[in-house]
Image: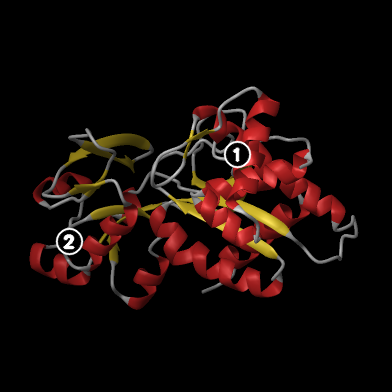
Amino acid sequence: MDDPKLMRLFVAVADLGTLSAVARSWGVAPSTITHGLKQLEERLGAQLVLRSTRRLSLTPEGERFLGESRRILGDLDEIMSGFAEDGPLSGDIRITATNDLGRERIAPLIDGFMRLHPGLHVHLFLSDTLVDLVEGGFDFGLRTGPLRDSGLKARLLLRGRKNICASPGYWDRHGRPAHPRELAGHNCLVLAPPGETQAFWSFREDGARFRIRVSGDRLVNDGQVLRDWAVAGAGVVLKSGFDIAADLSAGRLETVLDAYTAESTNLYAVFAPRGHEARRVRTLIDYLAAELAAPA
Protein backbone atom coordinates (compact mmCIF):
# COMPACT_ATOMS: atom_id res chain seq x y z
CA MET A 1 0.00 0.00 0.00
CA ASP A 2 1.12 3.57 -0.66
CA ASP A 3 1.40 6.08 2.19
CA PRO A 4 -2.04 7.73 1.78
CA LYS A 5 -3.76 4.34 1.75
CA LEU A 6 -1.82 3.29 4.87
CA MET A 7 -2.96 6.50 6.55
CA ARG A 8 -6.57 5.77 5.61
CA LEU A 9 -6.21 2.25 6.97
CA PHE A 10 -4.86 3.58 10.26
CA VAL A 11 -7.66 6.15 10.57
CA ALA A 12 -10.20 3.38 9.93
CA VAL A 13 -8.58 1.23 12.63
CA ALA A 14 -8.78 4.11 15.09
CA ASP A 15 -12.43 4.84 14.22
CA LEU A 16 -13.72 1.25 14.12
CA GLY A 17 -11.60 -0.16 16.95
CA THR A 18 -10.88 -3.65 15.58
CA LEU A 19 -8.98 -5.03 12.60
CA SER A 20 -11.86 -7.34 11.72
CA ALA A 21 -14.28 -4.40 11.57
CA VAL A 22 -11.97 -2.58 9.17
CA ALA A 23 -11.62 -5.71 7.05
CA ARG A 24 -15.41 -6.03 6.80
CA SER A 25 -15.76 -2.34 5.96
CA TRP A 26 -13.09 -2.52 3.26
CA GLY A 27 -14.21 -5.89 1.92
CA VAL A 28 -10.80 -7.53 2.35
CA ALA A 29 -9.31 -10.33 4.43
CA PRO A 30 -8.29 -9.47 8.03
CA SER A 31 -4.73 -10.51 7.17
CA THR A 32 -4.58 -7.66 4.65
CA ILE A 33 -5.39 -5.11 7.36
CA THR A 34 -2.95 -6.72 9.79
CA HIS A 35 -0.17 -6.63 7.18
CA GLY A 36 -0.94 -3.00 6.28
CA LEU A 37 -0.79 -1.88 9.91
CA LYS A 38 2.49 -3.72 10.43
CA GLN A 39 3.87 -2.14 7.25
CA LEU A 40 2.94 1.32 8.51
CA GLU A 41 4.54 0.81 11.93
CA GLU A 42 7.72 -0.47 10.32
CA ARG A 43 7.70 2.49 7.94
CA LEU A 44 7.47 4.92 10.86
CA GLY A 45 9.69 3.00 13.26
CA ALA A 46 7.09 3.33 16.01
CA GLN A 47 4.30 1.28 17.55
CA LEU A 48 0.97 2.97 16.87
CA VAL A 49 -1.50 0.47 18.29
CA LEU A 50 -1.73 -1.66 21.42
CA ARG A 51 -3.36 -5.00 20.62
CA SER A 52 -5.75 -6.62 23.10
CA THR A 53 -8.26 -9.43 22.84
CA ARG A 54 -11.27 -7.10 22.58
CA ARG A 55 -10.37 -3.70 21.20
CA LEU A 56 -7.33 -1.84 19.95
CA SER A 57 -6.03 1.28 21.67
CA LEU A 58 -3.61 3.88 20.39
CA THR A 59 -0.19 4.60 21.82
CA PRO A 60 0.84 8.25 22.36
CA GLU A 61 2.65 8.03 19.02
CA GLY A 62 -0.52 6.64 17.47
CA GLU A 63 -2.60 9.52 18.82
CA ARG A 64 -0.22 12.06 17.30
CA PHE A 65 -0.07 10.24 13.98
CA LEU A 66 -3.87 9.98 13.90
CA GLY A 67 -4.28 13.74 14.18
CA GLU A 68 -1.74 14.43 11.45
CA SER A 69 -3.23 11.73 9.22
CA ARG A 70 -6.71 13.23 9.47
CA ARG A 71 -5.37 16.66 8.58
CA ILE A 72 -3.24 15.45 5.65
CA LEU A 73 -5.98 13.23 4.22
CA GLY A 74 -8.51 16.03 4.51
CA ASP A 75 -6.22 18.39 2.61
CA LEU A 76 -5.50 15.70 0.03
CA ASP A 77 -9.21 15.02 -0.52
CA GLU A 78 -9.82 18.70 -1.08
CA ILE A 79 -6.94 19.00 -3.56
CA MET A 80 -8.09 15.93 -5.47
CA SER A 81 -11.65 17.25 -5.67
CA GLY A 82 -10.38 20.37 -7.39
CA PHE A 83 -9.61 23.96 -6.53
CA ALA A 84 -12.88 25.41 -7.81
CA GLU A 85 -14.39 27.64 -5.14
CA ASP A 86 -17.90 26.60 -6.16
CA GLY A 87 -17.23 22.84 -6.35
CA PRO A 88 -18.76 20.30 -3.97
CA LEU A 89 -17.15 19.92 -0.56
CA SER A 90 -15.79 16.57 0.59
CA GLY A 91 -13.64 15.08 3.33
CA ASP A 92 -13.74 15.03 7.12
CA ILE A 93 -14.22 17.91 9.56
CA ARG A 94 -13.42 17.32 13.23
CA ILE A 95 -14.87 19.73 15.78
CA THR A 96 -14.91 19.95 19.55
CA ALA A 97 -17.38 21.93 21.66
CA THR A 98 -18.75 22.02 25.19
CA ASN A 99 -21.57 19.66 26.06
CA ASP A 100 -24.54 22.01 26.33
CA LEU A 101 -23.50 24.29 23.47
CA GLY A 102 -22.79 21.26 21.28
CA ARG A 103 -26.11 19.56 21.98
CA GLU A 104 -28.38 22.59 22.06
CA ARG A 105 -26.93 24.80 19.32
CA ILE A 106 -24.18 23.17 17.25
CA ALA A 107 -25.60 19.71 16.53
CA PRO A 108 -28.81 21.08 14.97
CA LEU A 109 -26.79 23.52 12.86
CA ILE A 110 -24.57 20.70 11.62
CA ASP A 111 -27.71 18.88 10.50
CA GLY A 112 -28.55 21.85 8.27
CA PHE A 113 -24.99 22.15 7.02
CA MET A 114 -24.82 18.48 6.10
CA ARG A 115 -28.00 18.80 4.05
CA LEU A 116 -26.23 21.49 2.02
CA HIS A 117 -22.99 19.50 1.73
CA PRO A 118 -23.75 15.75 1.76
CA GLY A 119 -20.23 14.84 0.64
CA LEU A 120 -18.76 15.79 4.03
CA HIS A 121 -18.24 13.73 7.16
CA VAL A 122 -18.44 15.75 10.38
CA HIS A 123 -17.06 14.44 13.68
CA LEU A 124 -18.39 16.39 16.70
CA PHE A 125 -16.62 15.71 20.02
CA LEU A 126 -18.31 17.13 23.13
CA SER A 127 -16.42 17.78 26.35
CA ASP A 128 -16.38 20.43 29.07
CA THR A 129 -12.65 19.92 29.55
CA LEU A 130 -10.11 21.79 27.43
CA VAL A 131 -9.15 19.55 24.52
CA ASP A 132 -5.76 19.73 22.78
CA LEU A 133 -6.75 20.54 19.20
CA VAL A 134 -3.45 19.45 17.66
CA GLU A 135 -3.08 16.19 19.59
CA GLY A 136 -6.73 15.34 18.93
CA GLY A 137 -6.50 16.10 15.22
CA PHE A 138 -9.33 18.65 15.37
CA ASP A 139 -9.86 21.19 12.62
CA PHE A 140 -11.23 23.67 15.13
CA GLY A 141 -12.80 23.99 18.54
CA LEU A 142 -15.67 26.16 19.72
CA ARG A 143 -14.59 27.93 22.90
CA THR A 144 -15.81 30.76 25.05
CA GLY A 145 -13.60 33.67 25.99
CA PRO A 146 -11.73 35.62 27.11
CA LEU A 147 -9.33 33.08 25.63
CA ARG A 148 -6.12 31.97 27.22
CA ASP A 149 -2.97 33.23 25.57
CA SER A 150 -1.72 30.55 23.18
CA GLY A 151 -0.36 29.99 19.71
CA LEU A 152 -3.86 29.23 18.43
CA LYS A 153 -5.75 31.42 15.99
CA ALA A 154 -9.30 32.49 16.80
CA ARG A 155 -12.30 33.91 14.96
CA LEU A 156 -15.08 35.63 16.87
CA LEU A 157 -18.45 34.01 16.14
CA LEU A 158 -20.78 35.52 18.72
CA ARG A 159 -20.64 38.09 21.51
CA GLY A 160 -22.31 37.30 24.80
CA ARG A 161 -22.03 37.37 28.57
CA LYS A 162 -22.56 35.21 31.61
CA ASN A 163 -25.98 35.15 33.29
CA ILE A 164 -27.12 34.29 36.80
CA CYS A 165 -30.27 32.28 36.30
CA ALA A 166 -32.68 29.76 37.75
CA SER A 167 -36.17 28.53 36.98
CA PRO A 168 -39.07 30.91 37.73
CA GLY A 169 -40.35 28.32 40.21
CA TYR A 170 -37.08 28.41 42.14
CA TRP A 171 -37.14 32.22 42.32
CA ASP A 172 -40.77 32.17 43.46
CA ARG A 173 -39.91 29.79 46.31
CA HIS A 174 -36.65 31.38 47.44
CA GLY A 175 -36.86 35.00 46.32
CA ARG A 176 -34.93 36.93 43.70
CA PRO A 177 -31.66 38.42 44.95
CA ALA A 178 -31.25 42.18 44.59
CA HIS A 179 -27.46 42.09 45.09
CA PRO A 180 -24.82 39.41 44.44
CA ARG A 181 -24.10 39.17 48.20
CA GLU A 182 -27.56 37.63 48.61
CA LEU A 183 -26.44 34.57 46.63
CA ALA A 184 -24.95 33.31 49.90
CA GLY A 185 -28.49 32.38 50.89
CA HIS A 186 -29.19 30.45 47.68
CA ASN A 187 -28.39 26.96 46.44
CA CYS A 188 -25.79 27.74 43.75
CA LEU A 189 -25.00 24.83 41.43
CA VAL A 190 -21.40 24.83 40.25
CA LEU A 191 -19.63 23.70 37.09
CA ALA A 192 -16.17 22.53 38.14
CA PRO A 193 -13.62 19.83 37.31
CA PRO A 194 -13.13 16.87 39.68
CA GLY A 195 -11.32 17.92 42.85
CA GLU A 196 -12.67 21.47 42.97
CA THR A 197 -14.46 22.21 46.25
CA GLN A 198 -15.38 25.89 45.93
CA ALA A 199 -16.34 28.43 43.31
CA PHE A 200 -16.26 32.19 42.91
CA TRP A 201 -18.53 34.18 40.60
CA SER A 202 -17.41 37.59 39.34
CA PHE A 203 -19.50 40.77 39.31
CA ARG A 204 -19.11 44.49 38.72
CA GLU A 205 -20.43 47.43 40.75
CA ASP A 206 -19.64 51.13 40.19
CA GLY A 207 -16.91 50.15 37.73
CA ALA A 208 -15.11 47.84 40.18
CA ARG A 209 -14.92 44.07 39.92
CA PHE A 210 -15.53 41.83 42.89
CA ARG A 211 -16.02 38.12 43.50
CA ILE A 212 -18.59 36.23 45.55
CA ARG A 213 -17.96 32.77 46.90
CA VAL A 214 -20.92 30.54 46.14
CA SER A 215 -21.87 27.04 47.22
CA GLY A 216 -24.69 24.57 46.93
CA ASP A 217 -25.64 20.93 47.19
CA ARG A 218 -24.50 19.96 43.68
CA LEU A 219 -21.28 20.22 41.69
CA VAL A 220 -20.79 18.74 38.23
CA ASN A 221 -18.26 18.79 35.40
CA ASP A 222 -20.92 18.68 32.65
CA GLY A 223 -22.57 21.94 31.59
CA GLN A 224 -25.61 20.18 30.13
CA VAL A 225 -26.37 18.52 33.46
CA LEU A 226 -25.96 21.89 35.19
CA ARG A 227 -28.49 23.46 32.82
CA ASP A 228 -30.93 20.55 33.28
CA TRP A 229 -30.78 20.93 37.07
CA ALA A 230 -31.49 24.65 36.78
CA VAL A 231 -34.49 24.08 34.51
CA ALA A 232 -35.79 21.49 36.99
CA GLY A 233 -35.69 24.10 39.77
CA ALA A 234 -32.77 22.66 41.75
CA GLY A 235 -30.87 25.92 42.16
CA VAL A 236 -29.01 28.90 40.69
CA VAL A 237 -26.41 28.60 37.92
CA LEU A 238 -23.95 30.80 36.06
CA LYS A 239 -24.38 30.15 32.34
CA SER A 240 -23.41 31.68 29.00
CA GLY A 241 -26.31 33.51 27.43
CA PHE A 242 -26.07 31.62 24.14
CA ASP A 243 -26.22 28.29 26.01
CA ILE A 244 -29.58 29.14 27.56
CA ALA A 245 -31.12 31.39 24.88
CA ALA A 246 -33.89 28.90 24.11
CA ASP A 247 -34.64 28.38 27.81
CA LEU A 248 -34.91 32.13 28.38
CA SER A 249 -37.21 32.57 25.38
CA ALA A 250 -39.43 29.69 26.52
CA GLY A 251 -39.57 30.93 30.10
CA ARG A 252 -37.85 27.85 31.52
CA LEU A 253 -35.09 30.01 33.03
CA GLU A 254 -35.05 33.59 34.30
CA THR A 255 -32.00 35.80 34.84
CA VAL A 256 -31.30 38.08 37.81
CA LEU A 257 -28.58 40.57 38.77
CA ASP A 258 -28.07 41.57 35.13
CA ALA A 259 -26.83 45.03 36.19
CA TYR A 260 -23.98 43.40 38.12
CA THR A 261 -22.92 40.77 35.59
CA ALA A 262 -19.24 41.28 34.80
CA GLU A 263 -18.09 38.35 32.71
CA SER A 264 -18.17 38.48 28.94
CA THR A 265 -18.30 35.09 27.29
CA ASN A 266 -17.77 35.52 23.58
CA LEU A 267 -17.82 32.42 21.39
CA TYR A 268 -14.82 31.74 19.15
CA ALA A 269 -13.78 29.20 16.55
CA VAL A 270 -10.23 28.31 17.58
CA PHE A 271 -7.75 26.46 15.38
CA ALA A 272 -4.05 25.77 15.00
CA PRO A 273 -2.23 28.08 12.54
CA ARG A 274 -1.35 25.96 9.52
CA GLY A 275 -0.82 28.64 6.89
CA HIS A 276 -4.27 27.95 5.41
CA GLU A 277 -7.57 26.41 6.37
CA ALA A 278 -9.29 23.91 4.13
CA ARG A 279 -12.27 25.31 2.23
CA ARG A 280 -14.63 22.84 3.87
CA VAL A 281 -13.54 24.11 7.30
CA ARG A 282 -13.84 27.77 6.30
CA THR A 283 -17.28 27.11 4.87
CA LEU A 284 -18.52 25.45 8.05
CA ILE A 285 -17.15 28.25 10.25
CA ASP A 286 -18.82 30.85 7.99
CA TYR A 287 -22.08 28.91 8.23
CA LEU A 288 -21.93 28.66 12.04
CA ALA A 289 -21.13 32.37 12.36
CA ALA A 290 -24.12 33.34 10.21
CA GLU A 291 -26.56 30.95 11.87
CA LEU A 292 -25.51 31.71 15.44
CA ALA A 293 -25.84 35.46 14.84
CA ALA A 294 -29.27 35.11 13.20
CA PRO A 295 -32.32 36.08 15.30
CA ALA A 296 -33.97 33.10 16.97
Out of 52 and 271, give the one closest to the viewer.
Answer: 52
* Residue that mark 2 sits on: 176
Q: Amino acid at mark 1?
A: Leu
Q: Position of residue 69 (x, y in %)?
A: 67, 40
Q: Residues within 10 Å of mark 2 (few under 14, many from 20)?
A: some
Residue at image coords 90%, 55%: 83
Q: Is residue 44 above or below residue 225?
A: above
Q: Is residue 47 above or below residue 128?
A: above
Q: Amino acid at mark 2?
A: Arg
Q: Secondary structure at mark 2?
A: loop
Image side of residue 18 versus residue 174, left or right? right
Residue at image coords 35%, 70%: 247
Q: Position of residue 119 (x, y in %)?
A: 72, 67
Q: Which mark is residue 66?
A: 1
Q: Residue 130 lies in what quarter of the image?
A: top left
Q: Position of residue 104 (x, y in %)?
A: 43, 66
Q: Secondary structure at mark 1?
A: helix
Considering the image in quadrants, where does the N terminus appear? top right
Out of 59 and 118, give the one closest to the viewer.
Answer: 59
- Label located before the other in sequence (1 or 2): 1
Q: Position of residue 160 (x, y in %)?
A: 48, 54
